[in-house]
């Protein structure tokens, strides 16, 4: 029986590629007309890379599409504290580059990926999908990896909405190398602490020395505590519209931040949102939620992409060994809950 995947993001394409290489019939419906070519950058750790390896994604392609991150420096922590945290196999990716690798992996196995195929409704009892021209997929198992504004979650759990997490996030890349006093190959964090576990504002950046395979540009982000922006303002903006607010992410590093902003043309702005497990419906066939559709988390946690990849591996293992996919996702929810609690404890200890 064909497994239908709703959504062609990280979780959906990684799972589709792995299933197709295993000769397991799979069809993906993605509303966008083509694979993503823009988006934020992200870091993936050793756990995520081991999961990608288990799915069969070529390691050499991943290395070529990313930059090694040797560690993390927290400039806003007090002097004498644990300001540098070593990397655990972390690599930095532009989302478009990661999606290109995953799409090539899936295409190499002739996975049936249908772009520009918007699904407008889903039957929660049968898993049948409906598009603009009527039914596009009959009853059967559906893995709903259709993102934070998931149609499938809206049909299954209309009260489990994505909730604003109190910050907006902005991503940018310089148009060329910038002379910076910070060390290369480290992800640097500036910002202003708050009374809680999340800084009131954060500015992060990473750069690499120019080489034959790297141009030395800087990838940077900012997270600012404020009211959410309107839905119509989500997307790319001229950097001039947000430069002052970004500099205020850490007034003590305003010159450093300004050097990067002066070499940046546009910035992507969005709201940080969470999808909680509180009162969540237990995973059950025929529709299984995965990735951001089930457990989106604010980028402050830096775990969303890794969790999506681990979901794909858990579901791939269940589907290719005869295990129940609903039980696989129930176990994933438990693991995610434990991992997130551990991360909060680690951050709290680092501050202390």
Image (cartoon, rainbow, N blue to C red):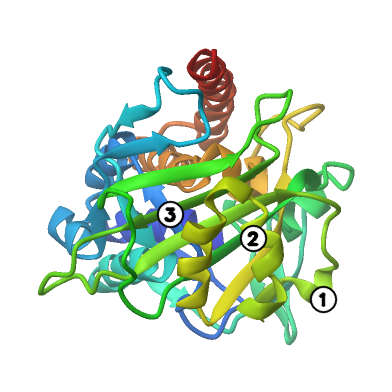
Residue 38 position, x and y percent, is 49, 76
Decide if residue 149 is in sight here: yes
Assign a secondary structure to mark 2.
helix
Total label count? 3
Return the residue found at the far right.
159
On the image, which quarter does residue 32 sit in? bottom right
Q: Is residue 293 above or below residue 265?
A: above
Residue drawn where x is 52% and y is 23% of the image: 343
Task: Calculate the distance from the C-alpha at mark 3 to the C-alpha at mark 2.
Answer: 13 Å
First in residue order: circle 3 vs circle 2: 3
> Do the CB atoms of the residues marked 3 and 1 lie less than 8 Å apart?
no
Q: Is residue 186 left or right of residue 212?
A: right
Residue drawn where x is 81% and y is 45% of the image: 163
Q: Which residue is mark 3?
A: 205
Task: Calculate the distance from the C-alpha at mark 3 to the C-alpha at mark 1.
Answer: 27 Å
Out of 298 and 24, give the one closest to the viewer.
298
Q: Which residue is mark 2?
A: 246
> Do the CB atoms of the residues marked 1 and 2 lie less than 8 Å apart?
no
Q: Quadrant of the C terminus?
A: top right
**Crowd around label 1: few <14 · some 14–19 · many ≥20 (10 Å):** few
Q: Is residue 179 above or below residue 310?
A: below
Assign a secondary structure to mark 3.
strand
């Amino acid at each position: 029986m064909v497994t239908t995947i709703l959504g062609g993001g990280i979780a959906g394409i990684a799972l589709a590629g792995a299933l197709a290489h295993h000769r397991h019939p799979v069809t993906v419906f993605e509303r966008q007309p083509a694979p993503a070519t823009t988006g934020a950058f992200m870091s993936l750790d050793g756990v995520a890379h081991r999961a990608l390896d288990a799915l069969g994604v070529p390691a050499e392609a991943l290395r070529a599409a990313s930059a090694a991150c040797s560690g993390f420096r927290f400039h806003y922590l007090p002097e004498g504290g644990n300001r540098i945290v070593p990397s655990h196999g972390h690599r930095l990716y532009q989302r478009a580059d990661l999606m290109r690798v995953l799409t090539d992996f899936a295409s190499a196995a002739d996975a049936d990926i249908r772009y520009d195929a918007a699904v407008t409704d889903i039957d929660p009892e049968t898993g049948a999908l409906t598009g603009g021209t009527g039914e596009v997929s009959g009853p059967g198992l559906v893995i709903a990896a259709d993102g934070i504004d998931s149609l499938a979650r809206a049909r299954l759990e209309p009260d489990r909405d994505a909730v604003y997490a109190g910050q907006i996030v902005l991503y940018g890349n310089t148009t060329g190398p910038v002379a910076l006093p910070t060390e290369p190959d480290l992800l640097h964090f500036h910002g202003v602490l708050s009374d809680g576990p999340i800084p009131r504002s954060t500015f992060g950046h990473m750069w690499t020395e120019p080489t034959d395979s790297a141009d030395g540009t800087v990838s940077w982000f900012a997270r600012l505590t404020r009211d959410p922006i309107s839905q119509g303002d989500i997307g790319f903006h001229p950097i001039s519209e947000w430069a002052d607010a970004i500099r205020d992410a850490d007034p003590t590093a305003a010159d450093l931040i300004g050097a990067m902003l002066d070499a940046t043309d546009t910035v992507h702005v969005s709201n940080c949102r969470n999808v909680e497990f509180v009162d969540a419906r237990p995973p059950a066939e025929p529709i299984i939620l995965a990735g951001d559709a089930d457990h989106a988390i604010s980028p402050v946690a830096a775990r969303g992409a890794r969790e999506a990849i681990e979901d794909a591996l858990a579901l791939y293992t269940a589907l290719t060994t005869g295990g129940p996919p609903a039980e696989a996702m129930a176990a994933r929810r438990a693991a995610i809950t434990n991992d997130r609690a551990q991360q909060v404890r680690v951050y709290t200890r680092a501050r202390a």
